[in-house]
Amino acid sequence: MLSENEIIEGCARHDRRAQQMLYDRYSRLLFGVCMRYASDRAEAEDILQESFLKIYFSIKEYSGTGSFTGWMRKIVVNTAITHYHRNLKHKHYVEIEEYVSVETGVSSFEEDFFTSDELFKVLNELPPGYRMVFNLYAIEGYKHKEIAEMLGIDINTSKSQYSRAKAALREKLEILRKLKEKYNAEDNIADLQK
Amino acid sequence: MGDRRHMELEELFRSRLDNIEAVPDPAVRHSLMRKLAVKEFLRFNPVRFNIYYAAGIVAAGITAAVMLFSHDDRAEKSKPGTINIKSEIRSDTVAMFYTPAGIRKESQEKIEKQRVSQSKIRSSERKLEVQSEQEDKSVAVVTSDTLKKMEFSPVVSDKTTNANIRKTPVASFKASFLQGCMPLKVSFYNTSVAYDSCKWIFGDGGSSVSVNPEWIYDRPGTYRVVLNVYGGGTVSSATEVITVHPKPSARFEVEPLNPTGGNDAVKFINYSNDAVRYRWDLGDGTVSFAFEPIHRYDRTGKYNIKLTVWSEFGCADSITVINALGGSDYFIEFPNAFIPNRDGPTGGYYSATSDASAHIFHPIASGVVEYQLRIFTRTGILIFESNDINIGWDGYNKGNLCEPGVYVWKVRVTFKNGETYVKMGDVTLLRGN
């Protein structure tokens, strides 16, 4: 096994083994990021591939300051944004009906109530525009101003999409929570009856 | 329960999804490495230039040799006996590379024998010796050392077998879903190798020749998807079964339709099909998971009732009935504009047929027993009052037509069930022609 620095140096020399090792070591983490942005697996895989090509060819530009993973993530996020713009014309719809009255007032959630998969699925169900803003703001930690520049939208659009994304997520989580509680309760009853 | 940590929505998602890992398809790695190799090759680099230069010369040499050989090959086909051996070798080689290891060895032995016989036939052709040696090496890399033994004799037919290895298509594909709810949109990814063209048969009568098609199954059922790939004169097939689950249907009725607030229990009668789980949003914030809930509303009103149902496969359907309750008997609604008749005050009497051209400002209402309508100017001056629901405002004040503009109305009604209702709004007085 090579260390991170050795891999980086190897990749800078276009050493095939180092390139493969880079992929093997980081593809799962970066694919997780891709999946958060993409609408489906196929798109996520496209983003991953493009990102890795960019990483391989621009690895010399990695200054060595700051975390390497963070640097790669940034590339992945930027690639995802490019993808989003490219696909925008196919996705230019929002299901209005679903997102009208959404403030449900629930503001906090139990840490372990939902599985990561459930959270992931809920996030994935958001319309692409909401998902981009939520990912960038809540998870990546960009500012609305930065997001507005990255996505080429108005800063207020970013803010309103973010709050709508949040409201939609809350509602979805609330529905999921009730369903889960109901099934948990049913399971308990079933256990008691045994 | 109490000691569990609570967190904000953002924190929840950040803590759980920030470093989530997902495993990409192994095919991605493969195709990435291939793309990388191509890209690096195309990218000019002085350090590696010599290698490419050398590789280019070798490639050119091979190409020239291939052309030379194929010319020769055509000439030879006229000789009887040669063709048989060749086609045998072809099929064996295919088996050798794409069958499980057990069979592999056997076919290699076969090939060996055939190669010996072949080389006897061709041993006189010395002019191709150089090229054949090259070919031998490239084959030896992929096959095992059994073939290396053959190096002493130039085997011309290696050319064909090698070309065939690359040209023999092997079909394989991935589908984004193997099962799902109707209508199911499936993206297919062609992961076949070495093919020139492909044909997809989706099992429901549809087909496609695109590489990575998308297909929507709009009927429930089990479908056998077949991918045929063509190349080098051979066909390879791969199949997969896609199951499309039926969609449940959400249907319900409400009884009674016009409950009087608080007294009548409303029964929801469930007519849904193919469903096993139900969720009712009863419009006043109540959610029920019962099959047929019974609910008492605190007050009459218009409630939007939504029923969502799930089948045993998790497929969902929902139906929302807007104003399901109380909508038909007790309501009052006002328009937001009207055009007074310029011929003079009419007194404001109207009926559904007499005011077809909207000369009079009046509500449509039902179940009203007491009624008071007042109209104010924007400055708050009362200009019209009516205690009879059959008398609306004709747009005149003390015999004079009012100025076009916005006026404020306020209505107080009592419905048959005793409920009092107060509402305010504005109306625009438009200028008639």
Image (tube, helix red, strand yellow):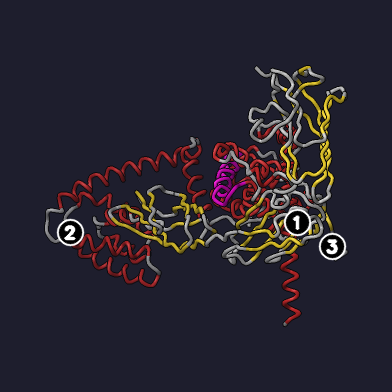
Discs 1, 3: same chain: yes
Q: Is residue B402 visible?
A: yes
Rounded to the nearest angstrom, the CA distance separating label 1 from label 3 is 43 Å
Packing grade of label 2 (10 A; few <14, some 14-19, many >=20) is few
Disc 3 marks which amino acid?
A: Arg
Range of the magenta residues?
Answer: A38-58
User: Residue A41 magenta-drawn?
Assistant: yes
Packing grade of label 1 (10 A; few <14, some 14-19, many >=20) is many
Discs 1, 2: same chain: yes
Task: Check the residue under mark 3 and report the chain it is in.
Answer: B
Residue drawn at (77%, 37%), measured in percent from left and top?
Answer: B389
Residue B271 on image: x %, y %: 61, 63
The mark closer to the camera, 1 or 2, is: 1
Rounded to the nearest angstrom, the CA distance separating label 3 from label 2 is 78 Å
Q: Determine whether label 1 and label 2 are within 8 Å by CB.
A: no
Residue, disc 2: B83
Circle nearer the N terminus (3, 2): 3
User: Residue A32 magenta-drawn?
Assistant: no
In the rendered view, would you say B28 is above or below B362?
A: below
Residue drawn at (34%, 65%), measured in percent from left and top?
Answer: B96
Residue, disc 1: B259
- Left or right: A117 as drawn, with respect to B11: left
Disc 2 marks which amino acid?
A: Ile
Task: Check the residue under mark 1 and report the chain it is in.
Answer: B
Discs 3, 2: same chain: yes
* Residue B317 quadrant: bottom right
Disc 1 marks which amino acid?
A: Pro
Query: What is the chief secondary structure element of the magenta stretch?
Result: helix
Residue, disc 3: B4
